[in-house]
Image: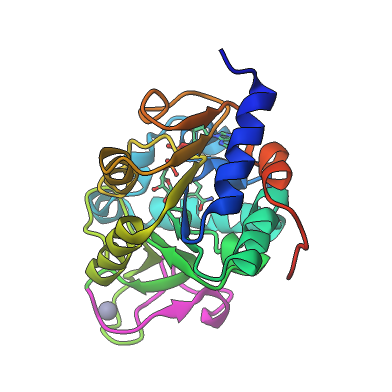
Amino acid sequence: MSTFDDLLIQAAEAISISQRPVIFTGAGISKESGIPTFRDAQEGLWARYNPEELASPRAFQANPELVWNFYQHRREIQRNCRPNPAHHALAALEHHKPACIVITQNVDGFHQLAGNKKVIPLHGNILENRCFFDCPGVISCEALPADGPVPPRCPQCGEKSLRPNVIWFGEFLDEALMTASLAAVEECDLLLIVGTSGVVQPAASLAQQAIDQGKTVIEINPEPTVYSDRVTIFLPARAAQVLPQLIPGPVEN
Ligand code: NAD
Ligand code: ZN
């Protein structure tokens, strides 16, 4: 059986020879930045809710104020957080291999902040808002009045219907982003899965596709997931600990 160090060497070698790596990330990569995942996450005031009770259209219809406040709480946490060494290592990877693409389920924008240019934000951006009733346009949090109704009014229809520009449980993904993600996985020569439980569909099926196609797949997660038994190399470790060891600098910002 291979030791952890053997696996690290094999993974570093696979990454170094890859020309078209794709990285598929989830909430775990931002955990060491201080952003809680949904599953470990429910703290304090929010402990009694399931993610689906706070992050779904049904939840917003039932209690828009509660859902808005939950997202304001998450935005407040994020304001005090920064990308961590795992995000920076992936920015260095794009620097070495310009064809590299990050597909992320995260809504924090930390890959872009760390310097990655080719990022597919499958689940949207938490610092933006749009109308629950599909009025056109996206409004940044910065553009919202500091004290107004909760949730804020949509400038188009006048309803108190602004919601975060993220994909909620039970909603469809943006078709163009999903098509681009499928193409990226199809064309990649290596898939690196980092910090995702692989239970949120249809995003999770992207990694499944690469495994089914027999691609080289490396997974980094301190806990085994639905993928771990089927990937080429499973590294049971924290992303910020292991990614900087796998990818040489320079760390460009
Ligand atoms: P998840 O909460 O289902 O799973 C997180 C995974 O990260 C777990 O498997 C856990 O073992 C792993 N993990 C924990 N610490 C880690 C570390 N230090 N390094 C590597 N892995 C670590 O997250 P998910 O699969 O992304 O699905 C949750 C959904 O919630 C996503 O759709 C996402 O949009 C949303 N979400 C986003 C953020 C964010 O933007 N940062 C945060 C919470 C939830
Ligand atoms: Zn509207």
The picture places residue 31, in percent across and down from the top left corner, at: 62, 42
Q: How is the image coloured?
A: rainbow
Q: Magenta stretch containing residue 233, yes or no?
A: no
Q: Image height check: is 109 above or below 237?
A: below
In the image, which residues are magenta? 134-154
Q: Which residue, as the protein is rendered here, is positioned at the far bottom?
A: 156
Residue 160 as seen in the image, left or right of residue 33: left
Position of 90 relative to 160 (above/below): above
Q: Residue at x 34, y 84 (%)?
A: 137
Q: Main secondary structure of the magenta part?
A: loop
Identified at 58% across, 65% down, the residue is: 97
Residue 12, quarter of the rendered image: top right
Farthest-out residue, top: 1
Foreground pick, 148 / 245: 245
Residue 41 percent across, percent down from the top left: 53, 36
Residue 54: percent from left, percent from top: 37, 45
Q: Quadrant of the C terminus?
A: bottom right
Seen at 43% across and 64% down, the residue is 121
Left or right, 229 with respect to 119, comes to: left
Residue at position x 22%, y 67% from top? 175
Q: Tell me the quarter of the image containing the N terminus.
A: top right
Q: Nearer the viewer, residue 103 or 147?
A: 103
Residue 217 in sight from this viewpoint: yes
- 138 magenta-colored: yes
- Figure disc tally: 0
